[in-house]
Image (cartoon, rainbow, N blue to C red):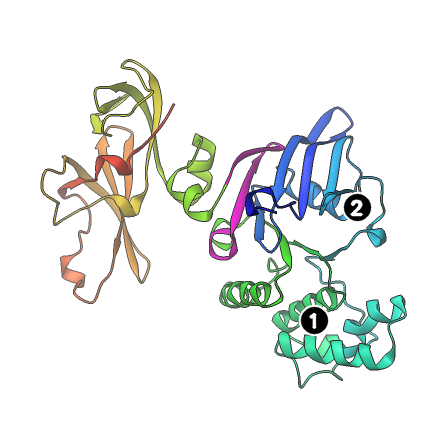
Amino acid sequence: MDATDAIPAVRLDGVSKQFADSYAVHDLDLDIEAGHFFSLLGPSGCGKTTSLRMIGGFTDPTEGSVLLAGEDVTGLPPNKRNVNTVFQSYALFDHLSIADNIAFGLKRKGVDRAETHKRVAEMLDLVQLGGLADRMPRTLSGGQRQRVALARALVNRPAVLLLDEPLAALDLKLRRQMQVELKQIQREVGITFVFVTHDQDEALTMSDRIAVLNAGRVEQCGTPEDIYEHPASRFVASFMGTSNLMTGTYRAGEVALDQGPALPVGRRSGITDGTAVSVSVRPEKIWLSDFEQDMPVLSGVIRETVYSGPTTTYLIEIAPGVTLSVLEQNTARARMEDRWSGGETVEFGWRPEHCLVLA
């Protein structure tokens, strides 16, 4: 079978979920390839957890079908689907040791003692808890408890692992560490991961592909780079990190702002002169010095300087009520006295192709 014809690990075919008079998920079509780390990303209430619960069998769709490896499992309960779930709360058994927590599912399936011991040992090594088999969950840190929950789910060798914001309860430093570790584990075991998160950085760091949900619908689905660099809508541009979003009218390679100057965007095929558009330019794409040759240059007044360790953000007013955020790296050559403090008029610019036009 050609790779392009491969059966997806998960397919949501016209799936909707209605609660009373409103839809949590509406007419969702989604294919998740086998072996991918796939993230469902969006703000609270967008339908991502409801979608995950329908894949796992915890919630039945009002309309549409859920398929796993080509098999329609829409009416099957969770224990009849080849999936496991890691919840945000971890749901460990506090009266069982770490090893017994991991072995729980195997024992319920009747796996013999020798095989259970072997697979539990493999999972403990995989999640770097080899010396803690006899410890109790209450003695573990948050990161260690998260690893136990992951091992307990993986030991059953599911075709798909569902993860419902499992890192949300961890502090920032540990969460970033676990993001890297979780992706490494996914690559090692080769199991399809479907990960729910509201954290854009988390999704960008870990995912092979991302579906951005808004009000129960997919706004855009693609690779992290596609989603960030080429947002398909104003919502995606604003939700994925920081973006300078403005509205205006497109004319001959420029967008004349509703309030403010004309911004260089380059010629855009498919957009006719006089079209009302939104424009988006990322703060890190804007140059404050060392302009490239022929780069269009604008000017504005620095109204605020925000130092954040590795970076400094400048808020630049380019017209009354119109302020751009500009991000600069604090490199080894950068000195405190070289930074602007506020009130100065500065020049800035960007490559026209870095200013996105959203019709």
Q: Is residue 18 left or right of residue 211?
A: right
**Which residue is at the front of the view, 140 or 120?**
120
Distance from Cα at disc 2 to Cα at disc 1: 23 Å
Using the image, tell me which numbered label, if any, was put on residue 57: 2
Where does the image place residue 107, in percent across and percent down from the top left?
Answer: 87, 71
Where does the image place residue 267, in percent across and percent down from the top left?
Answer: 24, 25
Using the image, tell me which numbered label, if any, was put on residue 120: none
The extreme top residue here reads 274
The residue stretch that appears in magenta: 203-221
At x 17%, y 41%, the residue is 348
- Which element carries disc 2, helix, strand or loop? loop
165 within the magenta span? no
The answer to whether 104 is drawn above or below residue 77 in the figure is below
Within-10-Å neighbours for mark 1: few <14, some 14–19, many 20+: many
Where does the image place residue 89, in percent across and percent down from the top left?
Answer: 71, 60
At x 50%, y 64%, the residue is 176
- Which element carries disc 1, helix, strand or loop? helix
Which of pointers 2 and 1 lies earlier in the amino acid sequence? 2
Write down the quadrant of residue 170 in the picture.
bottom right
- Would residue 34 be visible to someone looking at this image? yes
**Which residue is at the front of the view, 59 or 337?**
59
Write down the quadrant of residue 113 in the picture.
bottom right
Q: Amino acid at mark 2?
A: Gly
Instruction: Name the residue that disc number 1 marks.
Output: 148
The extreme left residue here reads 293
Q: Amino acid at mark 1?
A: Val
Q: Is residue 76 left or right of residue 5?
A: right
**Which residue is at the front of the view, 352 or 90?**
352
